[in-house]
Amino acid sequence: MSALVPATTRQRDRALQVLLSRDLEPIVDMVGWSRADGAYEVASADGAVRFRRDAGVDGGFWIESATGQNPLAVQDQTRFVGLEAERAMPHPSRHLNSYPHAFEQFAQLFDHPSAPDLCVIHSASHNWADQGGHLGEHGSLGVVQARAPFIVAGAGVPKLGMTDIGCRLIDVAPTTLRLLAADHDPDRPLLSHQDGSVIDALVDGPGRARYLIGFLWDGTNPNVLYDLAGRGEAPNVARLIGEGAACRFGALASLPTVTLANHTTILTGSHPGHHGILHNAWVDRRTGAQVITNSPATWATSMQWLNPGVQTMHHAAKRVRPGTTASINEPCDAGADYSTFGLVRNGERPPPAPGPDDLPDATTRFVRPSKDYRWASRADHTAIEQFHRVWANTDANPPVFTWVNFTLTDSAFHEGGPYSEMAASAVRDSDARLGRIFEVVEQTGVWEDCAFFLVADHGMEESDPAVRGDWDAALAEAEVVVRDEGYGFLYLSGS
């Protein structure tokens, strides 16, 4: 392996000729790149836009030029809100889709020294069957795949219920930490590399919470979750909404809208291009080696790629409220006193979960035949046991911040699609596990002193099984030499 240098204009143009062809339009939504002169460019088969950063203009970016149809013209976070509206427009075309905060999304990505030469955004309808994909997909910049649920409740949170608020995942950490920070200067960032801001409407009484508990339901479509909660099928989620606030317009994931990049975004308040976990996989340009962070073999050590000095919510929580913190089933555990993957690094492992026949809160219809549903259910069961271990032995002094990562929703929404009975069962199972955690908190006697939040790392969109294809094959046929890491991150080489 050797260091990778940026692609030449000729290399990039040869790749773009293939990627932006009408032949690939069903699977390629748009392509973005960073120019040597400091501008950014995003192009589709119908047009292109060139833009630059400028702190002096509204939104922080200005458009230098546009040709044809500007692919980033629509940035409406309220589009396809509500399950009925989403299902009425399945896998929308680029001309009907929306790309909130798109200028910021592309720019932050290319701030990373190992950013790709080209970032390909796949279409909403693309089913990654050739790459092992499922009926439910994410990774794109489109609003349904990027939109995550965000619910906050408890001490210091106004009781707004379902409210017309939208934000970004980078805003989650500053907002929820503010509930702990009684004496913190509101004009000073709570985190070292903070890109996000406090959503003031969600913080009624800063500093009123003594304990903060966060839940990540990986890959959960918010329209589906809110609908199930409203129909009584997720009573514990409904309890949080009733005792706090749910953002109807969601919290937008950062590009790329994939797992570990956005787990880390939530926990640092920083974009992937700034915190260092650029994707689930990418190329380290210094060495030319592939970096894989989101796999069972690498979860325990993935935070070695976190940029130096980047703080997590664990660091910040202990700074504003003295105490310990806990990270359960979460690879982004930097700064945590108790960590599942800290145990792994020390040669320990949590006790194994029961088999499918003895596993509580697991839908038999899916936990036996589906390997992914079974594995994720067992992992989430161990999360409950670890939470009990951490909270039940605290001598009335629980962790000031506890983070719990649930994985079942991602597995089920992928395999069955977001509108499937499998997805609904995963929500019901996860809601039952959420209730078990609530029981532990209530038994500890500190419920009134707790603030809670529930969020996902990205959304999930129903793909079209008929829309398959692989741009890598088309590039190879055109003799364009490329490494496609993380799928959609293209590193070019050759002449």
Image (cartoon, grey):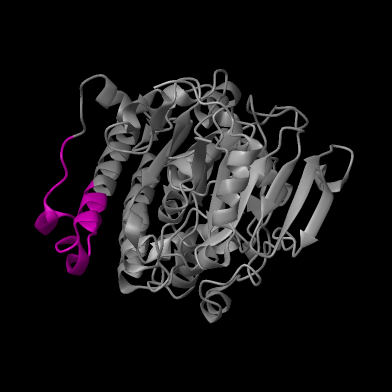
18 vs 33, nearest the viewer: 18
In the drawing, does residue 44 fall left or right of residue 116? right
In the drawing, does residue 142 fall left or right of residue 61? left
125 vs 172, nearest the viewer: 125
Task: Say which quarter of the image contains residue 417.
Answer: bottom left
Is 288 located above or below residue 118 in the figure? above
88 vs 316, nearest the viewer: 88
Magenta-drawn stretch contains 355: yes
Question: What residue span does the magenta drawing correspond to?
Answer: 351-378
Task: Say which quarter of the image contains residue 115.
Answer: top right
What is the x, y in percent for residue 172? 59, 43
What is the x, y in percent for residue 473? 40, 54
From the image, which quarter does the N terminus lie in? top left
Magenta-drawn stretch contains 74: no
* Residue ID at (71%, 47%): 41
* Residue ID at (64%, 32%): 111
